[in-house]
Amino acid sequence: MKNTKYVFVTGGVTSSLGKGIIAASLAKLLQERGYSVTIQKLDPYINIDPGTLNPYEHGECYVTDDGAETDLDLGHYERFLNIPTSQANNVTTGRIYQSVINKERRGEFLGKTVQVIPHITDEIKHRIQILGKTGKYDIVITEIGGTVGDIESLPYVESVRQLQWELGQENAIVIHLTLVPYLAAAGELKTKPTQHSVKMLMQSGINPNILVCRTEHEINDSIRRKLALFCNVKKQDVIQSLDAETIYDVPNMMFDEGLDKVVLEKLELSSEKQPKLIDWNDFVNKHKNPKSTIEVGLIGKYVELRDSYKSITEAFIHAGATNEVKVKVRWIHSEELTPENAASKLEGLNGVLVAPGFGERGIEGKIAAVQVARENNIPFFGICLGMQMAVIEYSRNILNLAGANSTEMSEKTAHPVINLMEEQKNITDKGGTMRLGAWDCTIEKDSKVFDAYKSELISERHRHRYEFNNEYLKQIEAAGMKATGVNTKTGLVEIVEIPSHPWFVGVQYHPEYKSTVLNPHPLFVGFIKAALQHSKK
Protein backbone atom coordinates (compact mmCIF):
# COMPACT_ATOMS: atom_id res chain seq x y z
CA MET A 1 0.00 0.00 0.00
CA LYS A 2 1.19 3.52 -0.86
CA ASN A 3 2.63 5.74 1.84
CA THR A 4 0.34 8.65 1.03
CA LYS A 5 1.73 12.14 1.55
CA TYR A 6 -0.45 15.09 2.58
CA VAL A 7 -0.27 18.74 1.54
CA PHE A 8 -2.46 21.27 3.36
CA VAL A 9 -3.32 24.64 1.83
CA THR A 10 -4.36 27.38 4.27
CA GLY A 11 -5.19 31.01 3.55
CA GLY A 12 -4.41 34.23 5.35
CA VAL A 13 -5.04 38.01 5.31
CA THR A 14 -8.19 37.83 3.14
CA SER A 15 -10.56 35.35 1.55
CA SER A 16 -10.85 34.76 -2.22
CA LEU A 17 -7.08 34.65 -2.76
CA GLY A 18 -7.45 31.53 -4.90
CA LYS A 19 -6.52 28.61 -2.63
CA GLY A 20 -8.53 26.31 -4.91
CA ILE A 21 -6.64 27.40 -8.03
CA ILE A 22 -3.24 27.10 -6.30
CA ALA A 23 -4.19 23.62 -5.00
CA ALA A 24 -5.42 22.55 -8.45
CA SER A 25 -2.34 23.99 -10.21
CA LEU A 26 0.04 22.22 -7.82
CA ALA A 27 -1.92 18.99 -8.27
CA LYS A 28 -1.70 19.36 -12.07
CA LEU A 29 2.09 19.75 -11.92
CA LEU A 30 2.50 16.78 -9.56
CA GLN A 31 0.24 14.72 -11.85
CA GLU A 32 2.46 15.68 -14.83
CA ARG A 33 5.44 14.45 -12.84
CA GLY A 34 3.84 11.01 -12.65
CA TYR A 35 2.20 11.11 -9.22
CA SER A 36 -1.43 10.15 -8.58
CA VAL A 37 -3.02 13.13 -6.85
CA THR A 38 -6.43 14.13 -5.53
CA ILE A 39 -7.67 17.29 -3.82
CA GLN A 40 -10.25 17.70 -1.07
CA LYS A 41 -11.94 20.77 0.40
CA LEU A 42 -12.71 21.30 4.09
CA ASP A 43 -15.50 23.86 4.43
CA PRO A 44 -16.02 25.51 7.84
CA TYR A 45 -19.75 26.20 7.53
CA ILE A 46 -22.33 24.23 9.53
CA ASN A 47 -24.53 23.30 6.57
CA ILE A 48 -24.18 19.57 5.82
CA ASP A 49 -23.48 20.52 2.20
CA PRO A 50 -24.11 23.57 -0.04
CA GLY A 51 -27.20 21.90 -1.54
CA THR A 52 -29.65 24.04 0.41
CA LEU A 53 -27.67 27.28 -0.01
CA ASN A 54 -28.89 30.07 -2.27
CA PRO A 55 -26.35 30.58 -5.11
CA TYR A 56 -26.00 34.21 -3.96
CA GLU A 57 -24.56 32.82 -0.69
CA HIS A 58 -22.00 30.42 -2.02
CA GLY A 59 -21.95 30.46 -5.81
CA GLU A 60 -22.65 27.31 -7.77
CA CYS A 61 -23.40 24.00 -6.08
CA TYR A 62 -21.23 21.42 -7.86
CA VAL A 63 -22.40 17.79 -8.13
CA THR A 64 -20.17 14.68 -8.34
CA ASP A 65 -20.86 11.33 -10.05
CA ASP A 66 -21.79 9.74 -6.72
CA GLY A 67 -24.34 12.44 -5.96
CA ALA A 68 -22.48 14.71 -3.55
CA GLU A 69 -23.58 18.35 -3.56
CA THR A 70 -20.29 20.16 -3.03
CA ASP A 71 -18.34 23.40 -3.11
CA LEU A 72 -17.58 24.90 -6.54
CA ASP A 73 -13.82 24.41 -5.93
CA LEU A 74 -14.34 20.70 -6.68
CA GLY A 75 -15.25 21.81 -10.19
CA HIS A 76 -11.81 23.43 -10.52
CA TYR A 77 -10.17 20.25 -9.23
CA GLU A 78 -11.91 18.14 -11.88
CA ARG A 79 -11.34 20.64 -14.69
CA PHE A 80 -7.60 20.79 -13.94
CA LEU A 81 -6.92 17.12 -13.12
CA ASN A 82 -9.41 15.50 -15.51
CA ILE A 83 -10.36 12.92 -12.86
CA PRO A 84 -13.71 12.74 -11.01
CA THR A 85 -14.13 13.71 -7.36
CA SER A 86 -16.54 12.10 -4.89
CA GLN A 87 -18.37 12.46 -1.56
CA ALA A 88 -15.02 12.11 0.22
CA ASN A 89 -13.53 15.17 -1.52
CA ASN A 90 -15.73 17.72 0.30
CA VAL A 91 -16.11 17.83 4.09
CA THR A 92 -18.13 20.43 6.00
CA THR A 93 -18.22 21.27 9.70
CA GLY A 94 -21.91 20.31 9.61
CA ARG A 95 -21.04 16.82 8.41
CA ILE A 96 -18.29 16.46 11.04
CA TYR A 97 -20.58 17.46 13.91
CA GLN A 98 -23.46 15.38 12.58
CA SER A 99 -21.24 12.30 12.52
CA VAL A 100 -19.88 12.89 16.04
CA ILE A 101 -23.35 13.58 17.47
CA ASN A 102 -24.73 10.42 15.82
CA LYS A 103 -21.90 8.40 17.42
CA GLU A 104 -22.66 9.97 20.80
CA ARG A 105 -26.35 9.03 20.45
CA ARG A 106 -25.34 5.44 19.69
CA GLY A 107 -23.19 5.38 22.85
CA GLU A 108 -19.92 4.88 20.95
CA PHE A 109 -17.93 7.17 23.26
CA LEU A 110 -18.58 4.94 26.29
CA GLY A 111 -19.96 7.71 28.46
CA LYS A 112 -17.09 10.15 27.86
CA THR A 113 -17.70 13.89 27.70
CA VAL A 114 -17.75 14.71 23.96
CA GLN A 115 -15.46 17.66 23.19
CA VAL A 116 -13.90 19.54 20.27
CA ILE A 117 -10.57 17.93 21.22
CA PRO A 118 -10.27 14.99 20.78
CA HIS A 119 -13.65 14.00 19.31
CA ILE A 120 -14.20 16.66 16.63
CA THR A 121 -10.51 16.79 15.67
CA ASP A 122 -10.34 12.96 15.50
CA GLU A 123 -13.30 12.96 13.12
CA ILE A 124 -11.64 15.64 10.96
CA LYS A 125 -8.39 13.66 10.85
CA HIS A 126 -10.34 10.54 9.90
CA ARG A 127 -12.08 12.39 7.04
CA ILE A 128 -8.81 13.93 5.81
CA GLN A 129 -7.21 10.47 5.56
CA ILE A 130 -10.12 8.58 3.91
CA LEU A 131 -8.81 9.28 0.39
CA GLY A 132 -5.21 8.54 1.42
CA LYS A 133 -6.17 5.14 2.83
CA THR A 134 -7.78 3.98 -0.44
CA GLY A 135 -4.29 3.20 -1.75
CA LYS A 136 -5.07 5.09 -4.97
CA TYR A 137 -3.14 8.30 -4.33
CA ASP A 138 0.50 9.21 -3.76
CA ILE A 139 -0.44 12.71 -2.61
CA VAL A 140 -3.65 14.15 -1.13
CA ILE A 141 -3.91 17.94 -1.23
CA THR A 142 -6.35 19.39 1.31
CA GLU A 143 -7.64 22.92 0.97
CA ILE A 144 -8.93 24.43 4.22
CA GLY A 145 -11.71 26.94 3.56
CA GLY A 146 -11.84 30.34 5.19
CA THR A 147 -8.95 32.38 6.58
CA VAL A 148 -6.54 31.64 9.42
CA GLY A 149 -7.91 33.31 12.53
CA ASP A 150 -11.55 32.53 11.72
CA ILE A 151 -13.16 30.91 14.79
CA GLU A 152 -14.85 28.28 12.63
CA SER A 153 -11.54 27.15 11.06
CA LEU A 154 -9.74 26.51 14.37
CA PRO A 155 -10.66 22.79 14.73
CA TYR A 156 -9.30 22.18 11.20
CA VAL A 157 -6.05 23.99 11.93
CA GLU A 158 -5.65 22.01 15.17
CA SER A 159 -6.31 18.76 13.27
CA VAL A 160 -3.57 19.65 10.77
CA ARG A 161 -1.17 20.36 13.66
CA GLN A 162 -1.91 16.94 15.16
CA LEU A 163 -1.55 15.17 11.80
CA GLN A 164 1.82 16.82 11.12
CA TRP A 165 3.03 15.58 14.51
CA GLU A 166 1.57 12.06 13.98
CA LEU A 167 2.68 11.56 10.37
CA GLY A 168 5.97 13.49 10.46
CA GLN A 169 7.02 16.65 8.59
CA GLU A 170 8.17 14.59 5.58
CA ASN A 171 4.64 13.19 5.16
CA ALA A 172 2.51 16.27 5.86
CA ILE A 173 3.38 19.84 4.88
CA VAL A 174 1.53 23.15 5.00
CA ILE A 175 1.40 25.74 2.20
CA HIS A 176 0.14 29.11 3.43
CA LEU A 177 -1.39 31.35 0.77
CA THR A 178 -1.25 34.98 1.72
CA LEU A 179 -1.47 38.51 0.32
CA VAL A 180 1.39 40.95 -0.20
CA PRO A 181 -0.50 44.18 -0.96
CA TYR A 182 0.90 47.10 -2.96
CA LEU A 183 0.42 50.52 -1.36
CA ALA A 184 0.30 53.02 -4.21
CA ALA A 185 0.84 56.01 -1.90
CA ALA A 186 4.07 54.51 -0.56
CA GLY A 187 4.97 52.92 -3.89
CA GLU A 188 5.93 49.62 -2.29
CA LEU A 189 4.80 46.11 -1.42
CA LYS A 190 3.99 45.48 2.24
CA THR A 191 4.93 42.25 4.03
CA LYS A 192 3.35 43.04 7.41
CA PRO A 193 -0.08 41.42 6.67
CA THR A 194 1.72 38.19 5.74
CA GLN A 195 3.89 38.35 8.88
CA HIS A 196 0.78 38.73 11.06
CA SER A 197 -1.00 35.90 9.24
CA VAL A 198 1.94 33.53 9.71
CA LYS A 199 2.27 34.60 13.35
CA MET A 200 -1.39 33.69 13.90
CA LEU A 201 -0.80 30.29 12.27
CA MET A 202 2.25 29.71 14.46
CA GLN A 203 0.21 30.56 17.57
CA SER A 204 -1.98 27.61 16.56
CA GLY A 205 1.11 25.38 16.57
CA ILE A 206 1.75 25.26 12.81
CA ASN A 207 4.88 26.51 11.07
CA PRO A 208 4.05 26.86 7.36
CA ASN A 209 6.58 25.02 5.20
CA ILE A 210 5.95 27.10 2.06
CA LEU A 211 4.56 30.62 1.54
CA VAL A 212 2.66 31.41 -1.65
CA CYS A 213 2.26 35.18 -1.91
CA ARG A 214 -0.51 36.67 -4.03
CA THR A 215 0.67 39.99 -5.42
CA GLU A 216 0.06 42.51 -8.19
CA HIS A 217 3.78 43.29 -8.54
CA GLU A 218 6.96 41.19 -8.72
CA ILE A 219 8.38 40.27 -5.30
CA ASN A 220 12.06 41.18 -5.38
CA ASP A 221 14.93 39.39 -3.67
CA SER A 222 14.99 41.62 -0.60
CA ILE A 223 11.27 41.10 0.06
CA ARG A 224 11.73 37.32 -0.28
CA ARG A 225 14.58 37.47 2.22
CA LYS A 226 12.49 39.56 4.61
CA LEU A 227 9.50 37.18 4.38
CA ALA A 228 11.77 34.16 4.86
CA LEU A 229 13.42 35.72 7.92
CA PHE A 230 10.21 36.80 9.67
CA CYS A 231 8.10 33.80 8.70
CA ASN A 232 10.58 31.02 9.53
CA VAL A 233 10.94 29.61 6.00
CA LYS A 234 13.84 29.36 3.54
CA LYS A 235 14.08 31.97 0.78
CA GLN A 236 13.37 29.38 -1.93
CA ASP A 237 10.17 28.47 -0.06
CA VAL A 238 8.71 31.95 -0.73
CA ILE A 239 6.71 31.57 -3.96
CA GLN A 240 5.13 34.53 -5.71
CA SER A 241 1.74 34.22 -7.35
CA LEU A 242 1.16 37.19 -9.62
CA ASP A 243 -2.30 38.09 -10.88
CA ALA A 244 -2.87 35.96 -13.99
CA GLU A 245 -4.61 36.76 -17.28
CA THR A 246 -6.54 33.48 -16.88
CA ILE A 247 -6.66 30.79 -14.18
CA TYR A 248 -5.29 28.37 -16.78
CA ASP A 249 -1.96 30.26 -16.71
CA VAL A 250 -1.41 29.45 -13.04
CA PRO A 251 0.09 25.91 -13.46
CA ASN A 252 2.78 27.35 -15.75
CA MET A 253 3.41 30.24 -13.37
CA MET A 254 3.74 27.87 -10.40
CA PHE A 255 6.12 25.67 -12.42
CA ASP A 256 8.30 28.70 -13.25
CA GLU A 257 8.36 29.54 -9.52
CA GLY A 258 9.30 25.93 -8.64
CA LEU A 259 6.36 25.26 -6.32
CA ASP A 260 6.07 21.59 -7.31
CA LYS A 261 9.83 21.05 -6.93
CA VAL A 262 9.88 22.58 -3.42
CA VAL A 263 6.85 20.48 -2.40
CA LEU A 264 8.48 17.24 -3.59
CA GLU A 265 11.72 18.09 -1.76
CA LYS A 266 9.80 18.66 1.49
CA LEU A 267 7.90 15.38 1.03
CA GLU A 268 11.17 13.54 0.20
CA LEU A 269 9.86 12.45 -3.21
CA SER A 270 11.75 12.30 -6.50
CA SER A 271 11.42 15.34 -8.77
CA GLU A 272 13.36 13.99 -11.76
CA LYS A 273 10.43 13.74 -14.20
CA GLN A 274 9.68 17.21 -15.56
CA PRO A 275 6.11 18.45 -16.18
CA LYS A 276 5.59 18.95 -19.92
CA LEU A 277 1.99 20.28 -19.97
CA ILE A 278 1.84 19.70 -23.76
CA ASP A 279 -1.96 19.24 -24.11
CA TRP A 280 -2.57 21.85 -21.43
CA ASN A 281 -0.49 24.49 -23.21
CA ASP A 282 -2.09 23.62 -26.54
CA PHE A 283 -5.44 24.48 -24.92
CA VAL A 284 -4.07 27.70 -23.33
CA ASN A 285 -2.61 28.77 -26.67
CA LYS A 286 -5.93 28.26 -28.48
CA HIS A 287 -7.81 30.00 -25.67
CA LYS A 288 -5.53 33.05 -25.86
CA ASN A 289 -5.33 33.22 -29.66
CA PRO A 290 -8.88 32.80 -31.00
CA LYS A 291 -9.52 33.19 -34.73
CA SER A 292 -12.91 34.84 -34.24
CA THR A 293 -15.37 36.04 -31.58
CA ILE A 294 -18.99 35.12 -30.91
CA GLU A 295 -21.47 36.40 -28.35
CA VAL A 296 -23.67 34.06 -26.35
CA GLY A 297 -26.45 35.14 -24.01
CA LEU A 298 -26.59 33.46 -20.60
CA ILE A 299 -30.15 33.86 -19.29
CA GLY A 300 -30.19 33.34 -15.53
CA LYS A 301 -31.72 34.37 -12.22
CA TYR A 302 -28.47 34.83 -10.29
CA VAL A 303 -26.34 36.73 -12.83
CA GLU A 304 -25.26 39.34 -10.21
CA LEU A 305 -22.97 36.63 -8.76
CA ARG A 306 -21.29 35.06 -11.75
CA ASP A 307 -19.85 32.25 -9.64
CA SER A 308 -23.42 30.90 -9.64
CA TYR A 309 -22.72 29.68 -13.19
CA LYS A 310 -19.00 28.91 -12.82
CA SER A 311 -19.04 25.50 -14.53
CA ILE A 312 -21.04 26.87 -17.48
CA THR A 313 -18.67 29.78 -18.12
CA GLU A 314 -15.65 27.45 -17.83
CA ALA A 315 -17.32 24.99 -20.25
CA PHE A 316 -17.69 27.93 -22.68
CA ILE A 317 -13.92 28.51 -22.40
CA HIS A 318 -13.13 24.82 -23.07
CA ALA A 319 -15.54 24.64 -26.03
CA GLY A 320 -14.35 28.01 -27.32
CA ALA A 321 -10.73 26.83 -27.41
CA THR A 322 -11.79 23.65 -29.25
CA ASN A 323 -13.53 25.78 -31.89
CA GLU A 324 -10.71 28.38 -31.80
CA VAL A 325 -13.20 31.11 -30.95
CA LYS A 326 -13.53 33.63 -28.11
CA VAL A 327 -16.90 33.20 -26.39
CA LYS A 328 -18.14 36.55 -25.13
CA VAL A 329 -20.91 36.10 -22.57
CA ARG A 330 -23.77 38.60 -22.39
CA TRP A 331 -25.24 38.25 -18.90
CA ILE A 332 -29.01 38.70 -19.03
CA HIS A 333 -31.19 38.69 -15.91
CA SER A 334 -34.33 36.69 -16.66
CA GLU A 335 -36.43 38.99 -14.46
CA GLU A 336 -35.71 41.85 -16.86
CA LEU A 337 -37.02 39.95 -19.91
CA THR A 338 -40.63 40.22 -21.07
CA PRO A 339 -42.38 38.99 -24.25
CA GLU A 340 -42.27 42.63 -25.43
CA ASN A 341 -38.55 43.37 -24.88
CA ALA A 342 -36.92 39.92 -25.23
CA ALA A 343 -36.20 40.23 -28.97
CA SER A 344 -34.38 43.57 -28.54
CA LYS A 345 -32.46 42.38 -25.42
CA LEU A 346 -31.26 39.27 -27.29
CA GLU A 347 -30.45 41.11 -30.51
CA GLY A 348 -27.05 40.33 -32.02
CA LEU A 349 -26.55 37.09 -30.04
CA ASN A 350 -25.12 34.04 -31.82
CA GLY A 351 -26.45 31.62 -29.19
CA VAL A 352 -28.80 31.56 -26.21
CA LEU A 353 -28.23 29.42 -23.10
CA VAL A 354 -31.06 29.30 -20.56
CA ALA A 355 -29.44 28.36 -17.27
CA PRO A 356 -30.52 26.11 -14.37
CA GLY A 357 -32.28 27.45 -11.27
CA PHE A 358 -35.13 26.92 -8.82
CA GLY A 359 -38.39 28.70 -8.02
CA GLU A 360 -40.76 30.87 -9.99
CA ARG A 361 -38.82 34.18 -9.99
CA GLY A 362 -37.76 35.16 -13.51
CA ILE A 363 -39.47 32.17 -15.15
CA GLU A 364 -41.52 34.13 -17.71
CA GLY A 365 -38.33 35.89 -18.83
CA LYS A 366 -36.66 32.54 -19.51
CA ILE A 367 -39.70 31.40 -21.52
CA ALA A 368 -39.58 34.65 -23.55
CA ALA A 369 -35.87 34.02 -24.30
CA VAL A 370 -36.62 30.46 -25.50
CA GLN A 371 -39.32 31.81 -27.85
CA VAL A 372 -36.96 34.38 -29.40
CA ALA A 373 -34.24 31.73 -29.94
CA ARG A 374 -36.73 29.23 -31.43
CA GLU A 375 -38.51 31.66 -33.75
CA ASN A 376 -35.31 33.34 -34.99
CA ASN A 377 -33.25 30.16 -35.51
CA ILE A 378 -30.66 31.24 -32.93
CA PRO A 379 -28.75 28.21 -31.52
CA PHE A 380 -30.39 27.34 -28.20
CA PHE A 381 -29.14 25.31 -25.25
CA GLY A 382 -31.39 24.73 -22.22
CA ILE A 383 -29.92 23.14 -19.08
CA CYS A 384 -32.14 21.54 -16.39
CA LEU A 385 -34.70 24.31 -15.69
CA GLY A 386 -33.72 25.73 -19.10
CA MET A 387 -34.86 22.51 -20.79
CA GLN A 388 -38.12 22.59 -18.81
CA MET A 389 -38.75 26.19 -19.95
CA ALA A 390 -38.24 25.08 -23.56
CA VAL A 391 -40.94 22.41 -23.12
CA ILE A 392 -43.33 24.94 -21.52
CA GLU A 393 -42.72 27.51 -24.28
CA TYR A 394 -43.35 24.92 -27.00
CA SER A 395 -46.51 23.68 -25.26
CA ARG A 396 -47.92 27.19 -24.96
CA ASN A 397 -47.01 28.61 -28.35
CA ILE A 398 -47.04 25.60 -30.71
CA LEU A 399 -49.52 23.22 -29.04
CA ASN A 400 -51.66 26.17 -27.85
CA LEU A 401 -51.96 24.65 -24.37
CA ALA A 402 -52.91 27.88 -22.58
CA GLY A 403 -51.26 28.26 -19.18
CA ALA A 404 -48.99 25.19 -19.65
CA ASN A 405 -46.48 25.24 -16.81
CA SER A 406 -44.44 23.31 -14.27
CA THR A 407 -46.13 22.30 -11.02
CA GLU A 408 -43.07 23.87 -9.32
CA MET A 409 -44.38 27.29 -10.45
CA SER A 410 -48.12 26.59 -10.57
CA GLU A 411 -49.52 23.60 -8.68
CA LYS A 412 -52.97 24.08 -10.22
CA THR A 413 -51.88 24.51 -13.86
CA ALA A 414 -54.31 22.99 -16.37
CA HIS A 415 -51.37 21.57 -18.36
CA PRO A 416 -48.55 20.33 -16.08
CA VAL A 417 -46.09 19.55 -18.89
CA ILE A 418 -43.38 19.54 -16.20
CA ASN A 419 -44.29 17.66 -13.03
CA LEU A 420 -42.80 16.63 -9.68
CA MET A 421 -41.01 13.27 -9.99
CA GLU A 422 -43.05 10.42 -8.50
CA GLU A 423 -40.35 9.45 -5.96
CA GLN A 424 -40.14 13.09 -4.78
CA LYS A 425 -43.80 13.42 -3.80
CA ASN A 426 -43.47 12.18 -0.20
CA ILE A 427 -40.15 13.89 0.54
CA THR A 428 -40.24 16.73 3.09
CA ASP A 429 -36.52 17.26 3.86
CA LYS A 430 -34.93 19.56 1.29
CA GLY A 431 -31.23 18.71 1.82
CA GLY A 432 -29.61 15.98 -0.28
CA THR A 433 -32.96 14.55 -1.46
CA MET A 434 -33.07 15.61 -5.11
CA ARG A 435 -32.28 13.28 -7.98
CA LEU A 436 -28.51 13.59 -7.75
CA GLY A 437 -25.40 12.19 -9.39
CA ALA A 438 -24.71 10.22 -12.56
CA TRP A 439 -27.56 8.51 -14.46
CA ASP A 440 -27.51 6.74 -17.81
CA CYS A 441 -29.30 8.03 -20.88
CA THR A 442 -29.94 6.35 -24.25
CA ILE A 443 -29.70 8.60 -27.30
CA GLU A 444 -31.44 8.34 -30.67
CA LYS A 445 -28.97 8.05 -33.52
CA ASP A 446 -30.68 10.57 -35.78
CA SER A 447 -30.16 13.60 -33.51
CA LYS A 448 -27.92 16.59 -32.83
CA VAL A 449 -26.88 15.09 -29.48
CA PHE A 450 -25.75 11.85 -31.11
CA ASP A 451 -23.69 13.91 -33.59
CA ALA A 452 -22.05 15.53 -30.54
CA TYR A 453 -21.53 12.50 -28.28
CA LYS A 454 -20.90 9.89 -31.04
CA SER A 455 -22.44 7.38 -28.65
CA GLU A 456 -25.87 5.87 -27.99
CA LEU A 457 -25.30 5.53 -24.24
CA ILE A 458 -24.12 8.39 -22.05
CA SER A 459 -23.89 9.07 -18.31
CA GLU A 460 -24.52 12.57 -16.98
CA ARG A 461 -24.96 14.27 -13.60
CA HIS A 462 -28.35 15.43 -12.33
CA ARG A 463 -29.74 17.82 -9.74
CA HIS A 464 -33.51 18.23 -9.94
CA ARG A 465 -36.93 17.29 -8.51
CA TYR A 466 -39.18 18.00 -11.50
CA GLU A 467 -39.33 16.18 -14.83
CA PHE A 468 -40.91 16.12 -18.27
CA ASN A 469 -44.50 14.83 -17.93
CA ASN A 470 -44.73 11.81 -20.25
CA GLU A 471 -48.50 12.23 -20.54
CA TYR A 472 -47.76 15.04 -23.00
CA LEU A 473 -44.97 13.22 -24.89
CA LYS A 474 -47.00 12.05 -27.92
CA GLN A 475 -48.65 15.44 -28.32
CA ILE A 476 -45.34 17.34 -28.15
CA GLU A 477 -43.53 14.94 -30.49
CA ALA A 478 -46.39 15.11 -33.01
CA ALA A 479 -45.95 18.90 -33.08
CA GLY A 480 -42.23 18.65 -33.92
CA MET A 481 -40.24 18.63 -30.65
CA LYS A 482 -38.54 15.25 -30.20
CA ALA A 483 -37.38 13.43 -27.08
CA THR A 484 -33.97 12.26 -28.36
CA GLY A 485 -32.59 11.05 -25.03
CA VAL A 486 -34.37 8.90 -22.45
CA ASN A 487 -33.41 7.05 -19.28
CA THR A 488 -34.67 3.62 -20.33
CA LYS A 489 -35.01 2.34 -16.74
CA THR A 490 -37.27 5.18 -15.54
CA GLY A 491 -38.72 6.43 -18.84
CA LEU A 492 -37.52 9.93 -17.85
CA VAL A 493 -37.07 12.23 -20.84
CA GLU A 494 -33.51 13.55 -20.57
CA ILE A 495 -33.11 15.43 -23.87
CA VAL A 496 -35.44 17.34 -26.18
CA GLU A 497 -34.61 18.74 -29.62
CA ILE A 498 -36.34 20.52 -32.47
CA PRO A 499 -34.97 18.80 -35.62
CA SER A 500 -36.19 21.60 -37.92
CA HIS A 501 -34.13 24.19 -35.98
CA PRO A 502 -30.39 24.69 -36.74
CA TRP A 503 -29.44 23.74 -33.13
CA PHE A 504 -32.11 23.57 -30.42
CA VAL A 505 -31.25 21.24 -27.52
CA GLY A 506 -32.58 21.04 -23.97
CA VAL A 507 -31.15 18.61 -21.41
CA GLN A 508 -32.51 17.70 -17.97
CA TYR A 509 -29.00 17.02 -16.62
CA HIS A 510 -25.98 19.29 -16.06
CA PRO A 511 -23.39 18.72 -18.82
CA GLU A 512 -21.28 21.62 -17.55
CA TYR A 513 -20.14 19.56 -14.53
CA LYS A 514 -18.19 17.16 -16.75
CA SER A 515 -16.40 19.63 -19.01
CA THR A 516 -12.64 19.71 -18.40
CA VAL A 517 -9.63 21.33 -20.06
CA LEU A 518 -8.57 18.06 -21.71
CA ASN A 519 -12.15 16.80 -22.35
CA PRO A 520 -14.40 19.74 -23.30
CA HIS A 521 -18.05 18.68 -23.09
CA PRO A 522 -19.34 17.58 -26.53
CA LEU A 523 -22.65 19.44 -26.17
CA PHE A 524 -20.91 22.72 -25.37
CA VAL A 525 -18.52 22.11 -28.29
CA GLY A 526 -21.55 21.51 -30.55
CA PHE A 527 -23.42 24.55 -29.23
CA ILE A 528 -20.44 26.89 -29.70
CA LYS A 529 -19.82 25.44 -33.18
CA ALA A 530 -23.47 26.17 -34.09
CA ALA A 531 -23.15 29.69 -32.65
CA LEU A 532 -19.99 30.21 -34.74
CA GLN A 533 -21.88 29.13 -37.90
CA HIS A 534 -24.72 31.50 -36.95
CA SER A 535 -22.23 34.38 -36.61
CA LYS A 536 -20.99 33.77 -40.18
CA LYS A 537 -24.50 34.28 -41.56
Image (cartoon, rainbow, N blue to C red):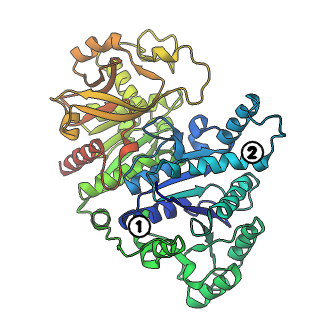
The answer to whether 367 appears left or right of 8 in the picture is left
Q: CA distance from mark 2 to mark 1?
A: 35 Å
Is 247 or 207 nearer to us in this picture?
A: 207
Residue 77: percent from left, percent from top: 45, 54
Where residue 13 sits, quadrant-wise, is bottom right
The residue labelled by disc 2 is 119
Give the number of marks: 2
Where residue 347 sits, quadrant-wise, is top left
The answer to whether 368 appears left or right of 110 in the picture is left
Q: Earlier in the sequence, mark 2 or mark 1?
A: 1
Residue 64: percent from left, percent from top: 45, 40
Residue depicted at 60% across the width and 38% down the height? 53
Is 219 or 255 nearer to us in this picture?
A: 255
The answer to whether 385 appears left or right of 451 in the picture is right
The residue labelled by disc 1 is 29
Q: Secondary structure at mark 1?
A: helix
Is 504 or 403 nearer to us in this picture?
A: 504
Residue depicted at 50% across the width and 59% down the height? 3
The amino acid type found where label 1 is placed reads Leu
- Asked if the residues shown at circle 2 and circle 1 are in contact, with their CB atoms under 8 angstroms apart, the answer is no
Q: Residues within 10 Å of mark 1 (few under 14, many from 20)?
A: many
Q: Which mark is residue 230?
A: none
Residue, far front: 1
